[in-house]
Image: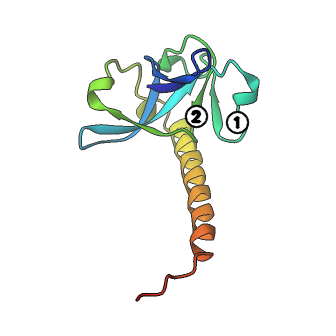
Amino acid sequence: MPYFDARSQRNSFKARPCLVIFGPKNNDYTVLPLSTISRPENHDPYYDIELIPSKFPKLNLPQICYVRTHKQTVAHQGALYKELADMKSEYPSQYADIIKQVNKFNQEIQKENIKCTTNIKPETVK
């Protein structure tokens, strides 16, 4: 998964857990990263959904982590190498809550873009 390495001040890649929410489509999956969010200033209280290992034991999480519903990305099928669990079938209610947050974030993006496009004046055709 891609991530920003604060030490080197550049993007890099590392193996990390993710939640597959769509795919495959053209050999790619849409995924949400799972993170421990070690820096509190990076935590989004609205879009980061907490997963506590004792509440979701079938997910095999070693510690509390967060589904980053506002950080969806694409992963090629070759980059996904080990399934930890199937949240959609093991915890369907929690999975549905996560998808709802993804949809809210995507709606926020759409609303912002609609505002931008309504302020654009059409160019005159010559």
Residue that badge 2 annotates: 68
Number of numbered discs overlaid on the protein picture: 2
Horizontal side of 108 relative to 14 (left or right) equals right
Residue 82: name its quadrant: top left
Check disc 1 and give the amino acid type. Answer: Asp
Q: Amino acid at mark 2?
A: Arg
Q: Quarter holding the C terminus?
A: bottom left
Nearest to the observer: residue 85 or residue 105: 105
Closest to the observer, 51 or 54: 51
Q: Is residue 101 above or below residue 3?
A: below
Give the x, y percent position of residue 50. 65, 28
x, y percent for residue 44: 70, 36
Q: Look at the image and tell me in which quarter the N terminus lies.
A: top left
Determine whether label 1 and label 2 are within 8 Å by CB. Answer: yes
Q: Residue 44: give its label.
A: 1
Please tell me the numbered disc located at residue 75. Answer: none
Q: Residue at x 63, y 18 (%)?
A: 64
27 vs 100: above or below:
above
* Left or right placement of residue 35 versus residue 25 in this view: right
Crowd rating for badge 2 (residues with CA inside 10 Å; few <14, some 14–19, many 20+): many
At label 1, counting other C-alpha atoms closer than 10 Å, the crowd grade (few under 14, some 14-19, many 20 or more) is some
**Mark with earlier residue (1, 2):** 1
- For image coordinates 75% across by 24% down, the residue present is 40
